[in-house]
Image (cartoon, rainbow, N blue to C red):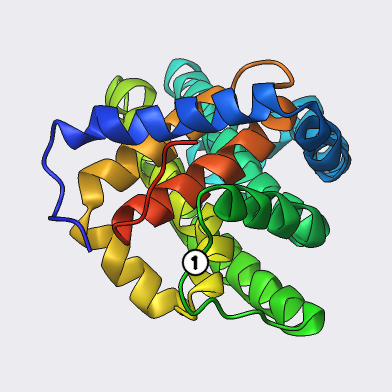
């Protein structure tokens, strides 16, 4: 294992996504292999996000029922803050759920991509090859835990988003940090499972290298805001997570 990370390793973590993008660009076959499940999940969740935006007014009024008896100005302010909070929380949840859903749909594809990268770098000592159904169950279990965690965080972010100024500045930053961490945990699931390491130990390892993990995860989170970035970046994020995992276990990462 490498030494625990320091604040400057945040930039190194970002670099792992950059390396993933570079590997992805040099291998056109990986582009096609990784894009289909990402596109399927993207269509599903963009449709859901569109519905949230369409009914934004009724949603904000329903969630601010406590302010119905307030003066018009105060009531409208609370509803406007609620609308902003709903958008922020929805974006947070869409990105997290998108990652879990994409990895679940595309598990065989992303497993192959990750394995190909590992093989090119010399493989994994004592690798554990799980049967397809066990790998699928692992992916589904991780996705469910991630979504439940994100839902709880989303509720807290919504109420924090009702605070003037703080809700529109501090809350998005906190959301990006928490979301980035959650993405890093989820994306490293495949390469950690190849080493026979379960979720609890995976989290423990990533916490020991928190700055490195955050740098990688937050950079992926931010890229998902780019139009179609989620579709294009997702396979590169899987590659980056594989390289990050190898780095944490002291294995070569340069192709």
Query: Circle 1 is placed at which residue position?
Result: 124
Residue 239 lies in what quarter of the image? top right
Q: Is residue 69 above or below residue 252?
A: above
Q: Is residue 11 above or below residue 212?
A: above
From the top left corner, tell me how far across and down residue 136 is, in percent: 75, 74
Q: Is residue 161 visible?
A: no
Number of residues whose C-alpha sits closer than 10 Å to that of mark 1, classed few (under 14), some (14–19) or many (20 or more): some
Q: Is residue 237 visible?
A: yes
Q: Nearer the viewer, residue 207 or 24?
A: 24
Residue 25 lies in what quarter of the image? top right
**For residue 208, side relative to residue 70 (left or right):** left
Total number of numbered discs in the rendering? 1
Q: Nearer the viewer, residue 255 or 34?
A: 255
Residue at screen point 51% across, 51% down: 242
Q: Nearer the viewer, residue 124 or 159?
A: 124
**For residue 60, side relative to residue 135 (left or right):** left
């Amino acid at each position: 294992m490498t030494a625990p990370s320091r604040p400057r390793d945040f930039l190194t973590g970002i670099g792992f996504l950059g390396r993933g993008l570079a590997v992805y660009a040099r291998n056109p076959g990986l582009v096609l292999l990784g894009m289909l499940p990402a596109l399927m999940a993207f269509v599903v969740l963009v449709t859901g996000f569109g519905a949230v935006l369409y009914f934004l007014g009724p949603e904000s009024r329903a969630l601010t029922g406590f302010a119905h008896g307030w003066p018009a100005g105060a009531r409208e302010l609370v509803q406007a803050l609620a609308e902003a909070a709903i958008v922020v929380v929805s974006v947070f949840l869409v990105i997290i759920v998108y990652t879990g859903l994409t990895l679940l749909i595309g598990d065989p594809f992303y497993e192959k991509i990750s394995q190909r990268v590992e093989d090119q770098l010399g493989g994994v000592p004592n690798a554990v090859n799980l049967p397809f159904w066990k790998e699928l169950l692992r992916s589904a279990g991780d996705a469910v835990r991630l979504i439940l965690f994100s839902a709880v965080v989303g509720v807290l972010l919504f109420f924090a988003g009702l605070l003037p100024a703080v809700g529109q500045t501090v809350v998005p930053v906190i959301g990006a940090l928490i979301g980035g961490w959650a993405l890093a945990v989820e994306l490293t699931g495949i390469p950690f499972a190849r080493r026979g390491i379960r979720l609890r130990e995976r989290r423990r390892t990533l916490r020991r290298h928190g700055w490195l993990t955050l740098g990688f995860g937050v950079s992926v989170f931010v890229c998902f805001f780019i139009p179609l970035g989620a579709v294009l970046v997702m396979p590169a994020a899987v590659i980056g997570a594989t390289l990050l995992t190898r780095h944490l276990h002291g294995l070569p990462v340069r192709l």
